[in-house]
Amino acid sequence: MAARAQDNQRRNGLDAVALVDDLLAQAIRAGASDVHFEPTADSLVVKFRLDGVLSPMESLPAAVADNVVSRLKVLGALLTYRNDIPQEGRLEISGASAEVVSDVRLAIFPTIHGQRAVVRLFYRRQDLLRLDQLGFAPPMERALQAIAAQNQGILLLTGPAGSGKSTTLAAILRHIVSTLPGKSIVSLEDPVEIRIEGVTQVPITPHGQMTFPTALRSLLRQDPQVLMIGEIRDAETARIAIEAGLTGHLLMSTMHSGAPAGALLRLLEMGIEPYQVTSSISAVVNQRLVRRLCEKCRRPAGDQYEAAGCDECLGTGFKGRVLIAEMVQLDSGLRKAILAKADMEELESLLRTKGHATIREDGRRLVEAGVTTQAELNRACGAGDAHAP
């Protein structure tokens, strides 16, 4: 009986190995950005995030859940015997998948039904390397190129996680490398997501000694001309970034904010003086990614198109994503309002009177061109703002 139990355990282990390999291969073929292994009372639900939307793919028996997560832990070089703590690691991908995937990260978290695992996949996208490949409206692309040529100031990118901010920053840095050779360019990232030739990239460990403020302070003594900070998360990092933007450095970073005005106000809430904000910030770009209608199955619906669903798009009606964005460049009127400590409503009212094109208006050009749908635009921008300008 003991031998039979060992055989069953061995078979389960082998099944878990094949199962995990197959699921990851499926995810890569589908272009999924994340694979979720979510334990429930009676199953392990596997979901793929396709074009930003999480979709259930399989429901595995609860009996194999521990083996599947253990296999993922082995691949990620994590502690298989610790089931009570969060763990993070990296997976090595070999074979044909390694040609399209640049990095694979694993996060494990304990729940009441067992361990939840999420695998995040990063792809080698040759079609999103340059600024002119990202899909910005031509006036905004030209404005970004002009900012990239400046010798000082701060460019902030805002938007939720997964809205393409890192891809945009990487494209801007490549633009600087190619158009302004000889500039000293350094990035601080947690972690380094996209490798960029010609840029000194520094990995940051927020819970270690090499934090964003520590690294940024030291780097300012190393004669950089262009700095990229993965994210401004706290007041200390914000203060040093503002100082860099005021003292002859071009600095780019991201902030989690739903709108450009919100990013400016958040800096003030972090204790940055209004005059420092108005003197250092060149522009704020707010961006989202919306799903692109599958060209093989989209169908007319009045003066627009709607999703249908086919084998090519796995029945979703969408394949790939496209960028929508808005940009606010600080002018005299906006600077005066910030110096007067205007609130969000006042800033947004001022932008409207100036004819500011919102992110939703940028998205409407794609709806009219049949690239996406109004429903998808509402989803990405917030259904509550469906009638907002």
Image (cartoon, helix red, strand yellow):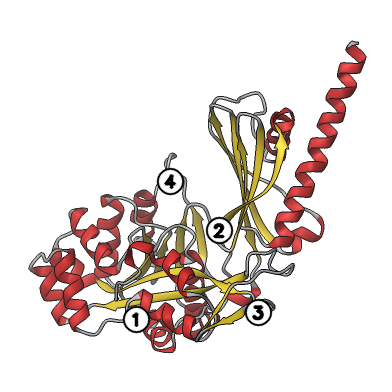
Separation of residues labelled 4 and 2 (CA atoms)? 34 Å
Which residue shows up at 73% across the image and 28% down it?
63
Query: Where's residue 110, x and y in %?
Result: 55, 30
Residue furthest to the top: 1
Measured Cα–Cα span from mark 1 to mark 3: 40 Å
Q: Residue at x 43, y 39 (%)?
A: 207
Q: Dots 3 and 4: beta carbons under 8 Å?
A: no
Precedes in sequence: disc 1 or disc 3: 1
Query: Which amino acid lies under the numbered mark 2 shown in the image of this protein?
Result: Val
Residue for badge 2: 53
Q: What amino acid does circle 3 point to?
A: Glu
Mark 3 lies on residue: 295
Establish if 3 lies above or below 195.
Answer: above
Nearer the observer, 136 or 245: 136
**Residue bearing the label numbered 4:** 210
- Quadrant of the image occupied by residue 113: top right
Percent coordinates x, y for residue 349 in the rendering: 17, 74
Residue 54 x/y as whole percent? 57, 54
Is the C terminus in the top left, top right, bottom left or bottom right quadrant?
Answer: bottom left
Q: Describe residue 166's horizontal placement relative to residue 359 as left or right.
A: right
Give the structural element (helix, strand or loop) at label 3: loop
Determine which of the numbered discs, if any, sits on residue 68 in the image. none
Label 2 SS: strand
SS category of the residue bearing label 4: loop
**248 sits to left or right of 62:** left
Q: Look at 82% across and 57% down and name the residue there.
A: 95
Asked if one can make out residue 93 in the rendered structure from this viewpoint, the answer is: no
Residue at (73%, 50%) from the top-left corner? 24
Front position among marks 4 and 2? 2
